[in-house]
Image: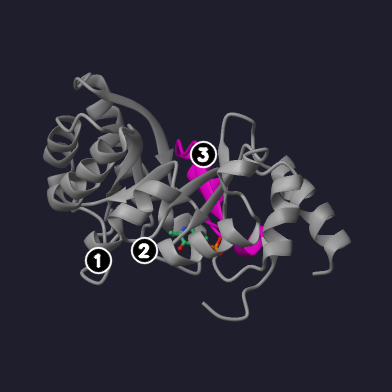
């Protein structure tokens, strides 16, 4: 897409998302020009799968401490390795992919060192797929409770990818499972949690996800156009 088309397209797509829902631009493989156009077009959150790629983009946009004029938030939406946790804590405003007590503790200790409290989501492997990251549904309640005990993390909800199907309607059971776990945990009022976000839905499923209760959607292809590689 050329710049003019991209500007118009981002405006159009943003208009299809009802206001309480936060659109996270899944920006993997995009150029700095594309990401800048998204930010200037009103996108409030940028999602990255990899710590290094987010770091390179923040540098390319020269969004260092001296230039915090953009109020965009950075979300980690890919699996986090422990040896990247320190950098992740420095670069991101939210980590959506906490999926084990071990990674939660590591992230918490880096937050403590920085004197920062970081919003996090617990990632659920709603399809119980062996090749996917995320905590199994049965492990999610205990993981939320364990993470809630960590003083420098603030659990704000759940995130899921769900299995990929050609037919987006087939994603609904996984979104419903995520929503019902969320509702159950929210009703427990676990101390030091603020259960308010459900992050689910991507380009082909975001409408179904919103109907099933998502208030964060992560969109790449439908926002920026097809990726040439992943
Ligand atoms: C790439 C990605 C998305 C967006 O995928 P699209 O199909 O391009 O919209 C959402 N969430 C995660 C975790 C991703 O890696």
Q: Is the residue marked by circle 2 packed among few (<14), some (14-19), or many (20+) residues within 10 Å?
A: some
Contact check, label 1 and label 2, Cβ < 8 Å? yes
Identify the mark nearer the N-term, 3 or 2: 2
Q: Quadrant of residue 120?
A: top left
Residue displayed at 29% across by 55% down: 85
SS for callout 3: helix
Would you say residue 173 is visible in this rendering? no
Instruction: Pinpoint residue 134: horizontal percent, then vertical percent.
Output: 25, 56
Residue 197 in view of the camera = yes
Q: Is residue 204 left or right of residue 115?
A: right
Say which residue appears at 23% left-offset and 52% top-offset. Answer: 99
Disc marking residue 146: none
Residue linked to disc 2: 163
Q: What secondary structure is marked by label 2?
A: loop
Check disc 3 and report the residue beneath it: 211
Give whichever of discs 3 and 1 has the lower sequence position. 1
Are the residues at dot 3 and dot 2 in contact (C-beta closer than 8 Å)?
A: no
Secondary structure of the residue carrying tag 1 is loop
Q: Nearer the viewer, residue 23 or 79?
A: 79
Which image quadrant: the N terminus?
bottom right
The location of residue 220, given as percent across then percent down, is: 59, 61
Q: Would you call the spot at circle 1 few (<14 residues within 10 Å), some (14-19), or many (20 or more)?
A: few
Stretch in magenta? 202-223
Task: Decide: is 194 above or below 132.
Answer: above
- How far is the residue under mark 1 from the one under mark 2? 8 Å
Q: Residues within 10 Å of mark 3 (few under 14, many from 20)?
A: few
Circle nearer the N terminus (1, 2): 1
Q: Nearer the viewer, residue 175 or 67?
A: 67
Disc 1 marks which residue? Answer: 129
């Amino acid at each position: 897409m050329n710049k003019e088309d991209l500007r118009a397209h981002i405006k159009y797509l943003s208009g299809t998302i009802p206001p309480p829902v936060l659109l996270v631009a899944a920006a993997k493989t995009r150029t700095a020009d594309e990401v800048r156009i998204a930010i200037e077009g009103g996108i409030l959150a940028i999602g990255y799968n990899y710590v290094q790629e987010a770091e390179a983009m923040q540098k390319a946009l020269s969004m260092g401490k001296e230039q915090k004029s953009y109020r965009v938030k950075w979300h980690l939406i890919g699996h986090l390795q422990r040896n990247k946790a320190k950098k992740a804590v420095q670069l991101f405003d939210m980590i959506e992919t906490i999926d084990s007590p071990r990674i939660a503790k590591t992230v918490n200790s880096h937050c403590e060192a920085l004197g920062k409290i970081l919003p996090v989501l617990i990632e659920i492997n709603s399809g119980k797929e062996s090749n996917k990251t995320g905590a199994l549904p049965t492990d999610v309640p205990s993981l939320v409770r364990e993470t809630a005990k960590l003083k420098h993390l603030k659990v704000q909800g759940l995130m899921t990818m769900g299995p990929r199907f050609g037919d987006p309607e087939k994603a609904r059971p996984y979104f419903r499972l995520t929503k019902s776990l969320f509702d159950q945990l929210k009703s427990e009022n676990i101390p030091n949690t603020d259960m308010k976000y459900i992050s689910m839905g991507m380009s082909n499923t975001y409408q179904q996800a919103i109907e099933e209760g998502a208030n964060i959607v992560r969109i790449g292809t439908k926002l920026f156009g097809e990726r040439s590689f992943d």
